């Protein structure tokens, strides 16, 4: 038996699908997890061998220093109680509290691994990023979804680029399996999701995080008189099933209501099959977030044949190098002009997107990526 300990969110679809695919590939693996985001109301997948849950009340978590201290103490208590050694302890998502776990983690493993998710490096203060340097230097292996983020981290902390410490390991995208097998006609999918069959469906972002810039995008669309001439031809979907706050989601809906555009906000959790149905139903995705590593949601849209409008500032050279077709703008104020162009030439644009399916599957299916994760533990 090969024992691995994860430290991270056991409810994350990326983590539990990673565990599922590793164990399907090699049943000898037994992966335990210390669940840093325990929720009584959320069902846990049974792919893990053992889940260590602990609780810190939300009220205490909101008190910065006290909340962090309690998380650290709870996790340390769990680590000290574990009676066996692991092939590796694998931390998911860089957090400063993990700095205080390195010494104890080293007592139960000879290999410490950290996976950088992207926002944990880009969407933090300079002070936090500087502190994270101690965490990264304490790891034996660091993993990234693409070369650009790896290079940014190496440069930021002046790491030796030739070190074997840095690896590329991408999370697979489980919805690709449903998309691959889908034989359902799009009109039926739209009917199931209560979407109009006779309109161009535009998805605005893919979560409720303000970095998706929903409000600014809607303002540009609303203020463009030429775009508003299309309002009877388009239907806007705004997925806000996770991330953000209630207040921010309410602001998005206020803007949509004022815009006179037809829309639907998706607020309830979507299953992987429902996510696949949404991707297949969408004609155009507007994905102009401030930062990213390797957007899974965007890739699912690309795989499904949708046209993607994204920002040239995002680190997507891997897609470009693989010949994946998508459209970019260099500034947010270009969004309405670009969207009008895509609507006017939608059939031609979709033709250009046809070859994206095979390219995205090769880049981001679990079957193509699981070996790179298993290699971390050997």
Image (cartoon, grey):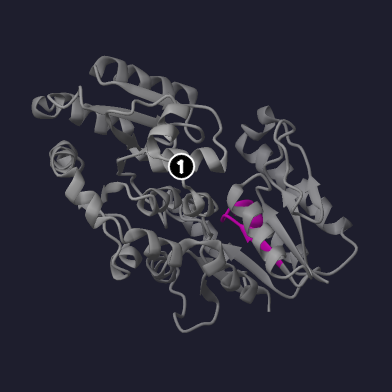
Q: Is residue 248 above or below residue 114?
A: above
Q: Is residue 2 above or below residue 331?
A: below
Q: Quadrant of residue 79?
A: bottom right
Determine whether the residue tagged by mark 1 lies in a helix, strand or loop.
Answer: loop
Q: Residue furthest right?
A: 83
Q: Which residue is mark 1?
A: 184
Instruction: Decide if residue 151 is in sight here.
Output: yes
How dense is the environment of label 1, judged by Cα within 10 Å: few (below 14), some, or many (20 and up)? few
Q: Image quadrant for the C terminus?
A: bottom right
Give how far across and how far down residue 280 sits, in percent: 40, 43
Side (left or right) of 136 relative to 248: right
Q: Residue at x 55, y 77 (%)?
A: 165
Give how far across and how far down residue 221 sits, in percent: 19, 29
Q: Image quadrant for the N terminus?
A: bottom right
Work out whether residue 85 or residue 21 is closer to the camera in this orientation and state it.
Answer: 21
Labels in figure, total: 1
Instruction: Decide if residue 330 is in sight here.
Output: no
Work out whether residue 296 or residue 347 is closer to the camera in this orientation and state it.
Answer: 347
Side (left or right) of 223 relative to 369: left
Q: Quadrant of residue 86?
A: bottom right
Side (left or right) of 29 relative to 297: right
Which residues are drawn in magenta?
89-98
Q: Residue at x 72, y 46 (%)?
A: 45
Work out whether residue 347 or residue 201 is closer to the camera in this orientation and state it.
Answer: 347
Give how far across and how far down residue 267 sits, in percent: 49, 27
Work out whether residue 11 or residue 124 is closer to the camera in this orientation and state it.
Answer: 11
User: In the rendered structure, does residue 341 fall within the stretch colored magenta?
Assistant: no
Q: Residue at x 54, y 82 (%)?
A: 164
Give how far across and how far down residue 230 sits, in percent: 16, 27
Q: Residue furthest bottom?
A: 162
């Amino acid at each position: 038996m090969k024992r691995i300990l994860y430290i991270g969110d056991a409810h994350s679809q990326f983590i539990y699908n990673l565990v599922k695919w590793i164990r399907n590939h090699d049943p000898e693996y037994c992966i335990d997890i210390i669940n840093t985001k325990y929720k009584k109301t959320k069902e846990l997948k049974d792919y893990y061998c053992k889940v260590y849950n602990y609780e810190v009340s939300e009220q205490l978590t909101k008190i910065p220093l006290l909340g962090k201290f309690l998380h650290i103490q709870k996790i340390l208590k769990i680590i000290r109680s574990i009676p066996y050694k692991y092939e590796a302890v694998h931390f998911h998502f860089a957090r400063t509290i993990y700095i205080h776990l390195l010494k104890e983690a080293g007592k139960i493993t000879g290999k410490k691994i950290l996976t950088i998710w992207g926002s944990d490096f880009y969407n933090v203060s300079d002070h936090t990023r500087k502190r994270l340097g101690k965490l990264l230097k304490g790891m034996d292996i660091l993993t990234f979804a693409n070369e650009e983020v790896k290079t940014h981290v190496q440069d930021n902390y002046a790491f030796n680029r030739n070190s074997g410490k840095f690896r590329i390991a991408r999370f697979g995208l489980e919805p690709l399996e449903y998309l691959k097998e889908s034989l359902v006609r799009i009109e039926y999918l739209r009917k199931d999701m209560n979407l109009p069959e006779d309109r161009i469906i535009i998805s605005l972002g893919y979560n409720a995080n303000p970095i998706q810039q929903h409000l600014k995008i809607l303002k540009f669309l609303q203020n463009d008189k030429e775009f508003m001439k299309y309002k009877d031809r388009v239907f806007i979907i705004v997925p806000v099933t996770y991330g953000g706050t209630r207040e921010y989601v309410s602001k998005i809906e206020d803007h949509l209501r004022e815009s006179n555009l037809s829309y639907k906000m998706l607020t309830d959790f979507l299953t992987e099959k429902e996510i696949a149905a949404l991707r297949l139903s969408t004609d155009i995705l507007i994905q102009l977030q401030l930062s990213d590593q390797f957007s899974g949601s965007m890739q699912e849209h690309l795989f499904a044949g949708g046209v993607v409008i994204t920002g040239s500032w995002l680190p997507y050279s891997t897609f470009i190098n693989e010949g994946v077709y998508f459209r970019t703008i260099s500034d947010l104020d270009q969004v309405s002009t670009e969207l009008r162009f895509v609507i006017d030439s939608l059939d031609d644009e979709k033709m250009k997107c046809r070859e994206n399916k095979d390219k995205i599957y090769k880049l981001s299916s679990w079957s193509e990526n699981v070996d790179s994760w298993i290699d971390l533990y050997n």
